[in-house]
Amino acid sequence: MALFVVNCSTKKDAFLNRSYHSVTTKYNVLYNGNEALRIGLAQLNANYEDNYWERLPIEPLKVDELAMPGMQADPDSSPQEFEKAEEKAVKAIQKHSMLIARQERNNQIDDAYLLLGKSRYYSQRFVPALEAFNFVLLNYPQANLINETKIWQAKTQVRLQNEEQAIKNLNNLLKNKSLKSDIKESAHTVIAMAYLNLDSLQLVINHLNKAVKTDNNKEQTARNLFILGQLYSEKGRKDSSNIAFQKVIDFKKAPYKYKIHAQLEKAKNATNKLDAASTLAVLKKLAKDRDNRPFLDELYYRIGMIEQENNKDIAIEYFKKSLQSNSKRNLQKELSYEALGNLHFDKAEFMVAGAYYDSILNITKSENTKRVRRLVRNRNNLNEIILYENSSKINDSVLTVVAMGEEGRIAFFNAHIEKLKAEEAKKSAKKSAKTGLSNPNFSKAETGENSGKWYFYNIQAVGFGEQEFRRIWGDRPLEENWRLRDKSQANYGNIQNAEQINAEAANSEKLELSYYLDKIPSEKVKIDSIVNERNTAYFKLGIIYKEQFKELDLAKDKFEKLITFSPDLALLIPAKYHLFKIYESQGNEKTVSLKNDIVANYPTSKYAKIILNPNQALEEDEKNAAETEYAAIYYEYEAEKFETVIEKTNLAIGKYMGEPIVAKLELLKAYAIGKSQGLVAFKEALEFVALNYPNTEESKKALEVIETIKLKL
C-alpha cells in the first residue's frame, strides 16, 4: 500500500501517476462536480420565469445589478449545488494537480478550472469566475476545451460590462476557420449579448441570424429565434418578425413555451382584418386544446384584444375568461383587469372601470412602473365620479322611501324582508342538500319500516330535526350556553364565536320591520340636508362629465334630472346654462326654449349676460382670469398632482408677470415642490419667495414656514 501511494505522488512524472490522477479527477471528482452543476442549472431554470411582455434576455439568468466589484450585492440565492460543484473543482485542483517543471501533467486540471469558473458564474461571482477562465487561457493554451473557455471568458466580461473586450476576443476566435459549429454558434450568441447591452440592435440581429444557422443547443436556438422575432417587431418589420416566429413554431425540438408564445406574438403582428381573422381562428383552436390549459390566460387575453376591434362585449367575455383561468402570472391578471377597465371606461361606465383599476392596484408588485403610475392617475380622476355617483344613489334611495308615506314604507320593507327570508331558506336548503338531509315534509307516517328505530338512525328524521332547530334557533355553534346570544353572561371569551353570534344577531335584526323604519329620517333639517347633498352630487357629476370627460349625454342626463328636483338658484341657474350649452352643441331643438327661460327668468345673472352679450361678458371675465386660473391650479394641488401644479404655475407666472397674483403662484409652487421633492428643495423655494416678493403676505408666510423647517433639518 505504501508503495502504491508513493508511486501515485503528484510530484513524480510517471505514466502510472499521470494515469491515476487523470482518471481519478475525471471519473470521480469532476464527474460529481459536473453533476452538481447540472442539478444546480436545472433548479435555476425551474425558478426562472420569462416575461414575454418584454424582450427576452439572450441568456435566461436573472443577475443582481449590484453584484459588481466594490458594491454590496443581495444575499446569494443561487442553488447550493453550485457551491458543491465549486468545492469539487477546488478539490480536483488541490489534490490532483501535477505541476512539474512549470508544466501541468494532469490533462484534466484545465477542465477543473473551467468547472470552477462556471460554478462561480452561475453564483453571480463574476470577478472570481473571470480569474478562473483567465488562468486556463494563460496556463493551458493547448487545452482541449480552450475555445469553450474563451466563450465563457467573454460571457463573464459581458456581465462585468466590458462588452468591447468580449467582442474583440470573440471576433479573434471566429477568425479560426477550423472552429466547430457549436463554438461558432455560442460565439455569435455571446457577441449578440454584448451588442444588446450596447443597444446596437442591428448588430444583435446580424449575430443572432448567424447563431441560428445551426442548432446544436436546441433551447438556445429556439430562444434566439424568438428574440429575433421580437427585435424585428420592434423595428416595424412585421413580415421578418413573423418569419422568425414561424421558424420557432416549426422547430420540432423547440421547448413548447417558445412555440405557444410565438403564436401569441404573431397575433400581435396582425396588421389587417384578414390577418386578424386567420389569427383569431388559430388562437381559438389553441384555446380548445387541453395541452394549452397553462396558457389559457394569455390566449384568452390575446383573443379579447383582437375581438375588441369588432365587438367589445365579446372582448369583455374573453378578458373575464382570462381572469377566471386561475393563472399565477400576476402581470397577465393586471393586463386583463386593465383591458376590462379601459373598455368600461370607453363605454362611460366609470364606476365599473374604477373597480377594475382598483383590482390592479391591489395585486400589482410594480408600483413604480410607468404603466402603473398612469393607471393611478386615471383611477384618481375617477374618485370624484365614484364619490358623487354613490352619494346620489344612496340619497335618491333615502328620499324615495321618505316620500312613500307610512303605509308605503311598511309595504316596501315587508316585501324586502320576505325576499331576505326566501334567500335564507334557499341557503339552508342548499346546506341540507350537501349533507343529504333534505326532506322538509318529513312526517312519522313516511318513516316506513324505519319508524320503530332510534331517531338518529333515520336520515329523514335527522334532516327534519336539523331544519326545525335552525328555523327556531338559527345557526348556533356546538358549545356550552348555546342558547345565549350574549356570551358575556356566561363569561364566554371566544372572540371568533362572539363575532359569529353578533353576525347572527345582525342578520336577525334585518328581518325586523323596526330595523328599517327607525333609520328613516323624519326631521325636516335632516331631510333638507340630504336633498342638498343629492342636488350638489348631481350638479358636480354634470360638470365632471361635461368638462373633464366630454361625455355630453351623461352630463345632459344629470342636469335634466337636477332641474326636476327644483334645487336652489345657486345650482339651478348654472345647471340650466350648462344644459343650454350642451343642447347648442348637439343642435337640440330645446336650445331656444332654454335660452329664453334663462334670459327671461334670471335676467340679472351672469349666465344671462353671457348669453346676450358674450364679448362684454368675456371682458369682465378677463379681470378675474388670474384668480380663476390660480383657483384651478390650487384645485390640482389639493388633488396631489404636484408635478402638474409646478408646470402650470410656471406658465401662469410668465403670463401674469408684474401682477399681485404672481406671489401667490410662487408660494403655491413652493408648496408643490415641498410635497414632491422634500424639505431641502421646499426651503430653497420658500427662500426664493421671501427674497423676491418682500412686504407681501406670501413672503411673511414663507419666512414662518422656513423657521419651522429649520427645526426639522
Image (cartoon, helix red, strand yellow):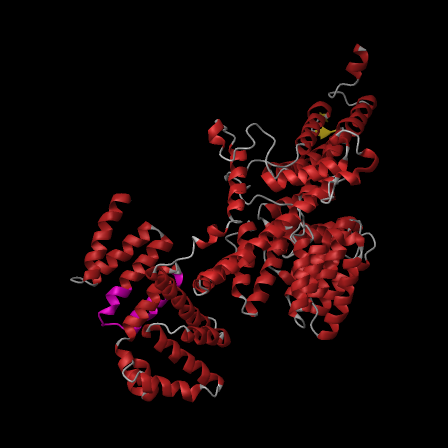
Residue under the point 38% across and 74% down: 566
Q: Residue furthest left?
A: 695
Residue 158 magenta? no
Taking the image as drawn, is residue 705 in sight?
yes
- Label count reads 0
Q: Residue 85: horizontal and vertical position, in percent?
A: 70, 31
- In this rendering, would 91 be left or right of 557? right
> 25 or 376, which lies in front?
376
Residue 221 visible somewhere in the drawing: no
Location of residue 316 in the rendering, given as x and y in whole percent from the top left corner = 65, 64
User: Is residue 656 one of those drawn in magenta?
Assistant: yes
Tell me which residue sits at (68%, 64%) in the image. 304
Rendered position, 154 above or below 120 = below
Q: Quadrant of the C terminus?
A: top left
* Magenta highlight range: 643-665
Which picture quadrant has residue 606? bottom left
In the picture shown, does residue 382 fall above or below 19? below
Would residue 501 appear left or right of 663 to someone viewing this image?
right
Quarter of the image where the N terminus is located = top right
- In the picture as drawn, the residue positioned furthest to the top comes out as 2
Q: Main secondary structure of the magenta part?
A: helix
The picture places residue 413, in percent across and down from the top left corner, at 52, 57
Along the line of sight, the residue nearer the viewer: 221 or 488: 488
Can you name the residue that lies furthest to the front here? Answer: 445
Q: Nearer the viewer, residue 464 or 623?
A: 464
Residue 658 x, y percent position in the rendering: 22, 72
Picture residue at 67% right of the left edge, 31% below the top:
86
